[in-house]
C-alpha cells in the first residue's frame, strides 16, 4: 500500500499488526475483545518503578516469560530510562544491556518482542536479534531509523513527546494539546509511510507523561477516539506514571489500583494496546469488567 492510502483503508488494515518474517498480531477481533497487553521489562537499575528493573539478562528473560504466561502478547524490552530528568544512555551500554536479554528470550519464546529505543544502531541490532517492533519515543526523528524499520519489515510505535526526557517536564505548554498531538502523529505516520513502512505495521502513542501536565494527559486519554481517526492502532502507556500519583496522591509503589483504573478507562475510550508493569492484575480487571458490564 502506498503513502497515499486512505485513512479508511489504513484503519481497517491496522487491526492486523504486520510483523517481520510474515508474522501477524491480531488486535481487537470482536467489539468487546480485550486490548493487547504489552508487558514492560526494563533491563536497567534506574527506571522509575523498581519492580520493573531487571538488570541482568537472566532476570529479564524470566520476567518476560512470566508476563507471557500471564497473558501479555507483547514484551517491551528497554535498557535506557527515559523518565523525566533522565540523561541519554550511551549506545554501547544500551546494546550491552539489551541484546543478551532479547537473544535469551527469543531462544525460548516465539512471543512478540518490542524494543524500547530511540537509537537506530540499537534498533537495528535488536531486530537482528529477534525483535518485531521498534518502540520509538522520538517517532523516527533520528536519521536512519525509518529505513532500518522498513528494511526489516518491522512494526513501529510512533510516540509524541514535547522536548526531551531531560527537559520535557520543565514547562510543557499547548494551545490545544489533543489537536497538536494529532497533527504531530499524522506527520510521523506520513514520514513512516514515505520510508516504506507498511501502514499495517504502524502504531501511534500520544506519549502520556512525555512533556505533558495532568490536564494534558487527561485530555489525551479522553481523546483516544480522535487519535484513532488517523487510522492506526493506539497504544497507551500510563502504568504507575506521575499522572496516577497526581490523581491518587500515592507514590510509585502504591499506584497499582490507579493504574488499573487508567487501563480500564483507556480500553473503554478505544485503546488497542496497553503498556503495563502489572500484567495479571490488568488482564483480570479488564476481563471481570467485560463479563459483568459489557
Image (tube, rainbow, N blue to C red):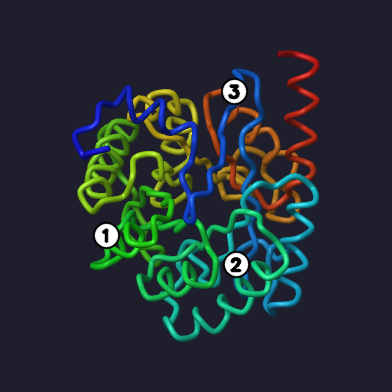
Helix, strand or loop at mark 1: loop
Identity of the residue drawn at 75% across and 13% down: 293
Q: CA distance from mark 1 to mark 3?
A: 31 Å
Residue 72 appears left or right of 288? left
**Residue that badge 2 annotates:** 47
Snapshot quadrant of residue 179: top left
- Residue 194 shown left or right of residue 207 in the figure: left
Residue placed furthest toward the top: 293
| Frontmost residue, 275 versus 156 | 156
Q: Quadrant of the C terminus?
A: top right
Question: Disc number at residue 141?
Answer: 1
In which image quadrant can residue 120 be found?
bottom left
Residue 250: image x %, image y %? 70, 47
The picture places residue 102, in percent across and down from the top left corner, at 60, 70
- Above or below: residue 11 compared with residue 162: above
N-term mark: 3 or 2: 2
Q: Give the image location of residue 52, x and y in percent.
A: 69, 63
* Count of number-bearing discs: 3
Please determine whether, in this image, residue 152 is positioned above or below residue 226: below
Seen in the picture, residue 121 relative to 73 is either above or below; the reply is below
Of helix, strand and loop, which one carries label 2? loop
Query: Vertically, is 11 above or below 189?
Result: above
At 34% from the left and 32% from the top, the residue drawn is 178
Q: Which sits earlier in the primary sequence, circle 1 or circle 2?
A: 2
Residue 138 picture location, percent across and down: 34, 58
Amino acid at each position: 500500500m502506498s503513502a497515499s492510502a486512505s485513512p479508511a483503508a489504513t484503519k481497517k488494515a491496522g487491526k492486523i499488526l504486520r510483523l517481520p518474517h510474515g508474522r501477524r498480531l491480531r488486535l481487537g477481533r470482536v467489539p468487546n475483545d480485550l486490548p493487547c497487553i504489552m508487558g514492560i521489562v526494563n533491563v536497567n537499575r534506574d527506571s522509575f518503578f523498581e519492580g520493573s528493573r531487571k538488570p541482568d539478562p537472566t532476570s529479564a528473560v524470566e520476567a518476560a516469560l512470566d508476563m507471557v504466561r500471564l497473558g501479555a502478547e507483547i514484551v517491551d524490552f528497554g535498557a535506557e530510562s527515559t523518565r523525566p530528568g533522565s540523561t541519554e544512555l550511551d549506545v554501547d551500554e544500551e546494546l550491552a544491556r539489551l541484546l543478551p536479554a532479547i537473544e535469551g528470550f527469543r531462544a525460548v519464546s516465539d512471543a512478540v518482542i518490542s524494543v524500547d529505543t530511540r537509537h537506530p544502531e540499537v534498533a537495528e541490532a535488536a531486530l537482528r536479534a529477534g525483535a518485531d517492533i521498534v518502540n520509538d519515543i522520538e517517532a523516527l526523528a533520528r536519521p536512519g531509523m525509518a529505513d532500518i524499520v522498513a528494511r526489516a519489515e518491522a512494526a513501529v510505535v510512533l510516540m509524541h513527546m514535547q522536548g526531551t526526557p531531560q527537559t520535557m517536564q520543565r514547562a510543557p505548554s499547548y494551545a490545544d494539546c489533543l489537536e497538536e498531538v494529532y497533527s504531530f502523529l499524522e506527520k510521523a505516520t506520513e514520514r513512516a509511510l514515505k520510508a516504506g513502512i507498511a501502514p499495517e505495521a504502524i502504531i501511534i502513542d500520544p506519549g502520556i507523561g512525555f512533556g505533558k501536565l495532568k490536564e494534558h494527559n487527561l485530555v489525551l486519554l479522553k481523546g483516544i477516539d480522535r487519535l484513532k481517526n488517523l487510522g492506526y492502532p493506539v497504544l497507551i502507556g500510563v502504568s504507575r506514571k506521575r499522572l496516577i500519583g497526581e490523581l491518587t496522591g500515592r507514590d510509585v509503589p502504591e499506584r497499582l489500583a490507579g493504574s488499573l483504573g487508567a487501563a480500564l478507562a483507556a480500553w473503554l475510550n478505544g485503546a488497542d494496546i496497553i503498556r503495563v508493569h502489572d500484567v495479571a492484575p490488568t488482564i483480570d480487571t479488564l476481563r471481570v469488567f467485560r463479563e459483568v458490564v459489557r
